[in-house]
Image (spheres, rainbow, N blue to C red):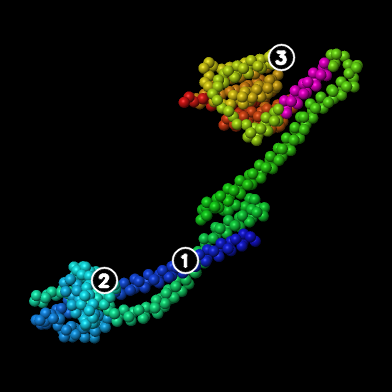
């Protein structure tokens, strides 16, 4: 319901925005049309009558002069010219100008007014018109109102010692008054008509465009609704080819990520339940042993011999150590899992660490009749890692190797330098690990068995894997049943600055 309302609101906003654009476009089109139509008519009129002034000079000034022998304007001649011109076109106004552009005479002007004889026309458009032979579009001053620019025809004359211009306004004041009267009605008709036609066709086009453009959006809304209703596998088909490819592909990626996270949460919940069950079992066993022997000591303390009492206390102590070790592993793994441990990397000699480990585990290996060997060349380069975490990983692997190596077996620690890293291998001669179980041994509290022989248990290997991940490395297992097991990991060589 809410997505439908949202979609309707979006379509309504798009439609209103589109309508506003159309109205503004229609008004702009109307104004532009009127302006261009006016310019087109003026230019056509000027081109059509470009030679009118020259024709007038050629016809009227052959036998008569615009200036009489007394230096006065031949008003009779100009009266006759104006009469003939206005009979043909009432919009025309004829002016006599001197070479400076000062108005000498015109029938349409009141020469008794003081300012009339001071009227002057800018000669720059006149000269440009004559130079172009009337083939351009030129606007000149209107002598009645020099603030207005009008189309004109002009020609230069020379009669005796008299020179000047015949300057003809092709759209005079009568034309302008008539045009202004008709302009409002014409503009209204043109504006309304063009706007209605534009709106009609644009509205049809707009509806189709909005429907087409929002098609991908509707698909996105539908997909989101299906996902919200529980269809977690629904995706937008061909999302990368959509007009909203960035949004649709992001939605598909988001949906897949959410689904993967949900599956991960389910898996983590299952592992959490298994972890709690395994922890409860492993904690219960040493606690039960400790509690049982303490109760035995309390009840039979007076009848027990010294060697029996010492045996019971040794069992209690051993179980306590196992319990303490398990709790320490749980605490360590929980910090690694929560990313609460940040490796403090530094350059150190892995060969020295290997010698220390070999020396520390030599006594335990001898007690189990196991041969402990250290194989490495001289000049092993420095590695760059957290020495305490690497030592912890090596100790866990050594504990694991000694635990599953039988009496008279062999454990070998090998260090081999490579091009950009040092390879560390801890190999035992134990029963090995079946191929199908090798991928499981690094999972926390994952138990694997071969018959009655226990191959792996606890958190030791899971901690090693986490430590390697903190060093952007990994640990590998190489094993075959009855051929022993080798754990291999790499550490980067320290690069000297």
Q: Which residue lies under the disc numbered 2?
A: 139
How packed is label 1: few (under 14 Cα within 10 Å), some, or many (20 or more)? few
Quadrant in which residue 347 is drawn = top right
Secondary structure at numbered mark 1: helix
Give the x, y percent position of residue 91.
27, 81
Seen in the picture, residue 305 relative to 99 is either above or below; the reply is above
Distance (Cα) linking label 3 and label 1: 92 Å
- The earlier-in-sequence mark between 2 and 3 is 2
Secondary structure at numbered mark 2: loop
- The residues colored magenta run 310-327
Is residue 284 rendered to the left or right of residue 465? Answer: right
Which residue sits at x=70%, y=19%?
406
Which residue sits at x=55%, y=22%?
348
In the picture, the disc for residue 367 is 3
Q: Is residue 223 visible?
A: yes
Distance (Cα) linking label 2 and label 3: 118 Å
């Amino acid at each position: 319901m809410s997505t439908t309302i949202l979609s309707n609101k979006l379509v309504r906003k798009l439609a209103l925005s589109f309508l506003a654009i159309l109205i503004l476009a229609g008004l702009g089109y109307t104004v532009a049309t009127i302006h261009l139509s006016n310019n087109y008519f003026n230019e056509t009129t000027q081109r059509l009558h470009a030679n009118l002034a020259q024709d007038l000079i050629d016809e009227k000034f052959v036998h008569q002069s615009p200036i009489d022998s007394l230096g006065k304007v031949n008003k009779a001649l100009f009266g006759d010219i104006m009469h003939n011109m206005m009979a043909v076109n009432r919009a025309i106004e004829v002016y006599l100008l001197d070479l400076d552009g000062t108005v000498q005479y015109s029938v349409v002007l009141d020469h008794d007014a003081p300012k009339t004889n001071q009227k002057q026309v800018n000669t720059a458009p006149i000269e440009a018109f004559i130079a172009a032979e009337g083939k351009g579009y030129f606007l000149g001053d209107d002598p009645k109102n020099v603030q207005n620019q009008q189309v004109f025809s002009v020609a230069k004359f020379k009669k005796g010692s008299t020179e000047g211009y015949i300057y003809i306004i092709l759209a005079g004041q009568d034309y302008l008054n008539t045009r202004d009267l008709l302009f409002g009605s014409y503009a209204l008709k043109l504006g309304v008509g063009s706007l209605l036609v534009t709106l009609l066709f644009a509205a049809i086009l707009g509806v189709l465009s909005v429907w087409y453009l929002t098609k991908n959006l509707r698909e996105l809304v539908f997909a989101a609704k299906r996902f919200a209703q529980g269809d977690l596998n629904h995706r937008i088909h061909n999302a990368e080819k959509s007009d909203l490819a960035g949004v649709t592909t992001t939605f598909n990626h988001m949906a897949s990520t959410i689904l993967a996270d949900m599956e991960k949460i389910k898996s983590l919940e299952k592992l959490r339940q298994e972890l709690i069950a395994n922890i409860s079992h492993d904690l219960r066993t040493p606690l039960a042993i400790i509690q049982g022997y303490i109760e035995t000591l309390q009840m039979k303390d007076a009848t027990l011999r010294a060697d029996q009492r010492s045996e019971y206390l040794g069992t209690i102590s051993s179980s306590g150590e196992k319990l303490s070790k398990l709790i320490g592993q749980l605490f360590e793994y929980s910090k690694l899992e929560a990313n609460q441990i940040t490796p403090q990397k530094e350059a150190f000699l892995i060969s020295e660490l290997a010698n220390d480990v070999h020396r520390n585990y030599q006594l335990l290996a001898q007690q189990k009749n196991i041969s402990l060997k250290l194989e490495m060349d001289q000049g092993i380069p420095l590695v760059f890692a957290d020495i305490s975490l690497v030592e912890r990983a090596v100790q866990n692997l050594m504990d694991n190797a000694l635990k599953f190596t039988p009496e008279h077996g062999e454990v070998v620690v090998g260090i081999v330098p490579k091009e950009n890293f040092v390879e560390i291998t801890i190999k035992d001669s134990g029963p090995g690990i079946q191929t199908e179980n090798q991928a499981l041994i690094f999972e926390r509290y994952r138990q694997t068995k071969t018959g009655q022989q226990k191959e792996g248990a606890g958190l030791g290997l899971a901690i090693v894997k986490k430590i390697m991940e903190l060093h952007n490395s990994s640990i590998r297992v190489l094993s075959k049943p009855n051929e022993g097991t080798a754990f291999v990991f790499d550490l980067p060589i320290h690069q000297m600055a």
